[in-house]
Amino acid sequence: MNYVKRVLTMRWRLVFCLLFSFISVAQATRAEKPVWLAKVIRELPRDEAAMAAAHKNSHDAAVQVSAGDPLQIVDFQGETSYNVTVGGEKRQLPYRYCRLGALSYGMQLTPEDRATLPTISKNRILRKVNGNYISLQLRVQRDEATGNVYLYYKPFAVVGAYDDQEQSQEFSPLMEDSVRDVRGIGLFVKPGTSPSAEAFRTFVAINKNTLALDSPDSDEPVLKPHYEFFFGRLRVDGDDIQLHVFGTTHHRTQLNYFNTYSSPTERKECMMVSTIFFTEYTIAKQSPSKKAARDVNLQRRGQIALDDAHAFAAKKGYQGDAWDNLSEILDAIIDGELR
């Protein structure tokens, strides 16, 4: 059976809905019930074709944070509102949130690739590459009526400057291309699990990048799209909120547990650094708009083989494998049970 067709039918489904079923019609009860802003997935894609289909079908690319906004928003100082249906009526409900750094991403070029940059714009390009990084962030939502804390289902992206720890910077075409390829596919909730704040604390995104592979028939590399998972796991203990971040590599056979986020002051402090070269330009062929990766270095506190995670799930007696029990597997890594 065609993998993509299976994805779009029985294998897994995205649930594109806001979960409002727990809202009472009675006015007195409304204030006691949360209105979940959640996009739920019950199963992860398992192969390259399924990953590609999930990425293509998700429109929740990373939201670009405007230049001049804070690098992060902590202590639920952010305020927003949404038009939602409560008890059959349209209402605008307020929410407070944090926007927390999850993964910092820096770029570098080899001397050979620097030499091929356009003469006119070379210095400007190098200032961007050497001076800026991308901060992939997640939003922690708090329901005003109940105080329930959970993750929002869309990722956010901020351009930071190594020498500015306060404000976000302007997006270049290259960085816009990068963040468009980070797409949230939803909050993972196991089948049979009821909606709750506790259930909505595992975020899943798919990152598409372009790899430069050696060609046996040419000096020019072969460019191939490649897909990996990005996970965020929220842990809440009273007022203590911790965001733990994971990402897969090697065609999703390795699960990496990243270092705790901190805003980098130089490129080597980024949690992920890609050695890139540019494949397309815009604006009279002077501004790079697409790139490919030659190599990637990670700052991580641990790495787990997926086979070991599957074995752990079987040993624990879980129904299904590691991907079927994603939240439990991430918790086991955080707590040191799975190393």
Image: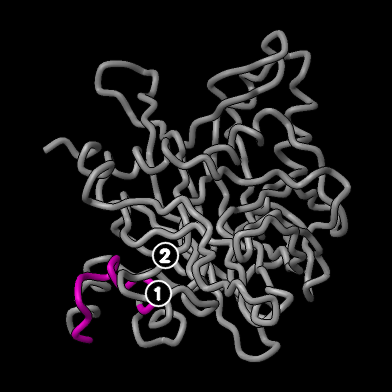
Location of mark 1 (residue):
327
Q: Is residue 119 above or below residue 113?
A: above
The region drawn magenta spans 316-328
**Which residue is located at x 39 percent, y 26 percent?**
223
Cα separation, mark 2 vs mark 1, equals 8 Å
Where residue 257 appears, as percent x and y from the top left, is 46, 69
Single out the mark in the foreground, 2 or 1.
2
At label 2, counting other C-alpha atoms closer than 10 Å, the crowd grade (few under 14, some 14-19, many 20 or more) is many
Location of mark 2 (residue):
188
Mark 2–mark 1 CB contact (< 8 Å): yes
Q: Is residue 174 visible?
A: yes
Where residue 179 appears, as percent x and y from the top left, is 60, 41
327 in the magenta segment: yes
State which quadrant residue 324 falls in: bottom left
Q: Nearer the viewer, residue 121 or 110?
A: 121
Left or right side of 81 for 16: left
Disc tally is 2
